[in-house]
Image (cartoon, rainbow, N blue to C red):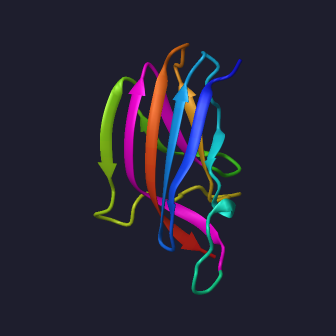
Amino acid sequence: MADTVTSQTIQDGARHVVMSFTNVSDGTGESAVKKVDVSALGSDPVTGSACSTVAIQSVWFSTLGMSVKLLWDADTDVLALHLPADYSDTLDMSEFSGLNNNASTGVTGDIMLTTVGHTSGDAYTVVLKMVKHYS
């Protein structure tokens, strides 16, 4: 058996992408699972350039029993955010340019997710609003 997970793209516009992720754990958990695949996002409608990276502008989240790590995918993944267990909050980084990928080598632009301390029945909901950057 595996965790019950969903991933949903709510909006994939020219500038922003909004995605929602849920998990109800059977105790298995997730380890560096690709949640945001920039190669699957829409291209720039004016230039046709592909989306190469995203910046995390806002996060809405709720965790029950486990914490969640959001990771920038690279040769060595880099922690973007660690969302605490048993907590709900909204994080707004729109006052500045958002959280940008600061990994050094092998950057893919993708965002991975890892659950920490998961047991059967634990759950999370994470909604990300991101700014798209094009190559």
Q: Is residue 57 magenta?
A: yes
* Quadrant hosting residue 99: bottom left
| 33, above or below 99, in the image | above
Kindly indicate the quadrant of the structure image that contains residue 84.
top left
Instruction: Out of 77 and 50, give the one closest to the viewer.
Output: 50
1 is higher (above) or lower (below) than 8: above
Name the residue rendered at 71%, 17% in the picture: 1
Residue 91 against residue 51 in the figure, above or below: above
- The residue lying at 54 percent from left, 19 percent from top is 118
Is residue 84 visible in the rendered image? The answer is no
Q: Which residues are magenta?
A: 49-72
* Residue 24 shows up from this direction: yes
Number of on-image labels:
0
Looking at the image, residue 100 lies above or below residue 127: below
Q: Residue at x 58, y 37 (%)?
A: 6
Q: How far from the left and from the top, in percent, is residue 22? A: 51, 35
Q: Position of residue 45 (x, y in %)?
A: 58, 81
Side of 39 relative to 64 (left or right)? right
- Most prominent secondary structure in the magenta stretch? strand
The x, y position of residue 49, in whole percent, is 65, 79
Q: Residue furthest left?
A: 95
**Residue ranking furthest to the top:** 120
Q: Residue at x 58, y 64 (%)?
A: 53
Whether residue 50 is in magenta: the answer is yes
Is the C terminus in the top left, top right, bottom left or bottom right quadrant? bottom right
